[in-house]
Amino acid sequence: MDGRLETVRALEQCMLNAWPSTRAVHCDGWVFRSANGYTRRANSAHALTPSRDFPSVFAKARNFYAALGQPATFRLTPLAGAGADALLHRLGFACADPTIVMSTRISGDMSIDQTVTIATHYSEGWGSAYAAARGLSPAEAEAHAIILRTIALPTAYATWHVDGVPLAFGLGVLDYGRLGLFDIATTARARRQGAARKVVSSLIGWGHMRGAHTAWLSVIADNVPAIALYGHFGFGERYRYHYRAEPGAPSALPQPAFAAG
């Protein structure tokens, strides 16, 4: 078995666990996911262990999303194979959000910054503060909250405050030694104060204290500041993916400020 593909598969399984959808169907080694339209990664078809030619999977996926009133979207990692991308391109499915998946080994010198608070359960306060910082609509905020309340693994909700005001946020999800980072976001007021770095280091410190040996995340490929931030912590590229969206699909879906969807 190709060792690189096994690494991809392991991280993809972590992603599916850490960022759940509200509906999911397993079909021929693919997972068709839907979550009220919030983020592409929770509203797209993902390859894990493809067992049939892609045209058969494509037809089933399109029927799945049509029944939900959603355009079909495919998240294409190296597991999907080149044939899937080529067919979707020929059918006019637009390419969107080229994304890098990065990871790093966790060292023992990470700790929780004293200016960052960590909660291990979702709260409406954290959700509403994050939604306000991101400018989410009420519908987007509720869809986001549903995803967070659905996470079944140990979680860390990080917040950086200034004078009691929450200004930076992050989410860590621990999956048996692998810590996924999501929702890393800062308000305009928090920029250039090292807020994101403090949030990331605190989440990694939290994970390390609970036995995490690896941290991973995904970031939009042209987000140079975020990639530089993560490089400071030793994150390196492991693989890339992109989406193919059915004609008529929204050109953009909500994405975290740093981590990609």
Image (spheres, rainbow, N blue to C red):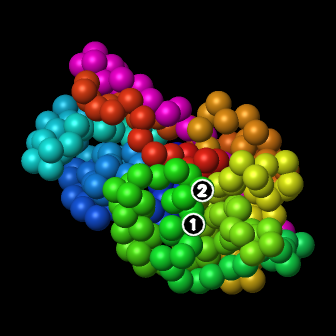
- Magenta highlight range: 82-107
Q: Is residue 172 left or right of residue 114?
A: left
Whether 68 is drawn above or below 21: the answer is above
Residue ID at (51%, 79%): 123
230, 196: nearer the viewer: 196
Residue 174 can be seen, yes or no:
no
The spot of residue 23 in percent (x, y) is: 24, 62
**Residue behind mark 1:** 129
* Distance (Cα) linking label 2 and label 1: 6 Å
The spot of residue 130 in percent (x, y) is: 56, 62
Q: Is residue 22 left or right of residue 161?
A: left
Q: Are marks 2 and 1 in contact (CB under 8 Å)?
A: yes
Residue ID at (80%, 42%): 228
**Residue behind mark 2:** 133
Residue ID at (25%, 24%): 247
Residue ID at (54%, 58%): 132
Give the SS element for disc 1.
Answer: helix
Q: Which mark is residue 232?
A: none
Residue 131 can be seen, yes or no:
yes
Q: Amino acid at mark 1?
A: Ala
Tell me if residue 105 is in the magenta stretch. Answer: yes
236, 123: nearer the viewer: 123
Q: Is residue 137 left or right of residue 128?
A: left
The image shows a total of numbered marks equal to: 2
